[in-house]
Image (tube, grey):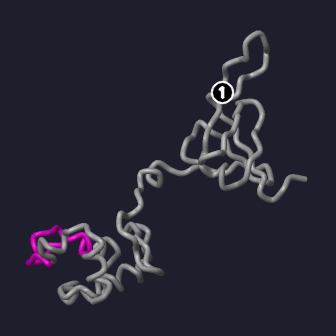
Amino acid sequence: MPNDTDWSVIDLNAVALMPNSDQIAPRIHDTRPGRRWPLRSDVGCPMPEQDARMFLKDPAFVVRDNRDEIVVGLAGRQIERTPPKEMLPPRIVMADLDELTDAALLTRAAVHPAFTTLPPKPDRALMVDFLEGLFTVQSPRGFDDVVLGEDARENTADLAARMLDG
């Protein structure tokens, strides 16, 4: 039975044969300094989970966990995300507005001074528009004033902190 940390990786691009042989030549990949893995397309290369997860970002690799089940790779949208350049305080995370629940959207919208201009029970789309600074009087929703000013359209960690702190 495999070790709990033994995962395996297959490189679908490793298709070249070794000279004078019918064996597939491995392609060597580094996951971190001192960690080199000879990956082939026909046999999985066992490695610790930490190293195997490094290959999830590329669909050319098939990663299997210690139960021999394929681990789904990251979606393009997840790969494109970049970590913030500033360190966030403990227990604070950055999230896309689409990832938040309706209650979380309402909590964030409620701390804005212009929140009172929203209808009593704003729907999800309206709260997202409000937080993105797109909610205006001339909007298709039928309101008259610009709710958020230019400064609220800044996409900075400082703005997020100010909105959360009140």
Q: Is residue 146 magenta?
A: yes
In the image, residue 70 above or below residue 93: above
- Report which residue position mark 1 lands on: 14
Local crowd size for mark 1, using a 10 Å CA cut-off: few (<14), some (14–19), many (≥20): some
Amino acid type, label 1: Ala
Give coordinates of residue 78: x percent, y percent: 47, 55
Furthest toward the top, the residue is: 20
Viewer-closest of 115 and 48: 48
Q: Which residues are magenta?
A: 129-147
Residue that sits furthest to the right in the current view: 1
Q: In front here: 115 or 36?
A: 36
Instruction: Tell me the quarter of the picture where residue 23 sits.
Output: top right
Residue at the far front in the pictured view: 34
Q: Main secondary structure of the magenta part?
A: loop
How many numbered marks appear? 1
In this rendering, is residue 20 above or below 123?
Answer: above
The quadrant in which the C terminus is found is: bottom left
Horizontal and vertical percent position of residue 50: 66, 55
Residue name at image x 65 percent, y 33 percent = 28
| Residue 117 vertical placement versus 139 (above, below) | below
Q: Position of residue 33 (x, y in %)?
A: 60, 47
Q: Residue at x 9, y 78 (%)?
A: 145
Q: Position of residue 26 (x, y in %)?
A: 70, 28
Residue 139 location, quadrant: bottom left
Q: Is residue 128 left or right of residue 99?
A: left
Magenta residue check for 37:
no
- In the drawing, does residue 98 fall left or right of residue 160? right
For this rendering, which residue is in front, 159 or 108?
Answer: 159
- Secondary structure beneath dot 1 equals loop
Is residue 64 toward the left or the right of residue 54 in the image? right
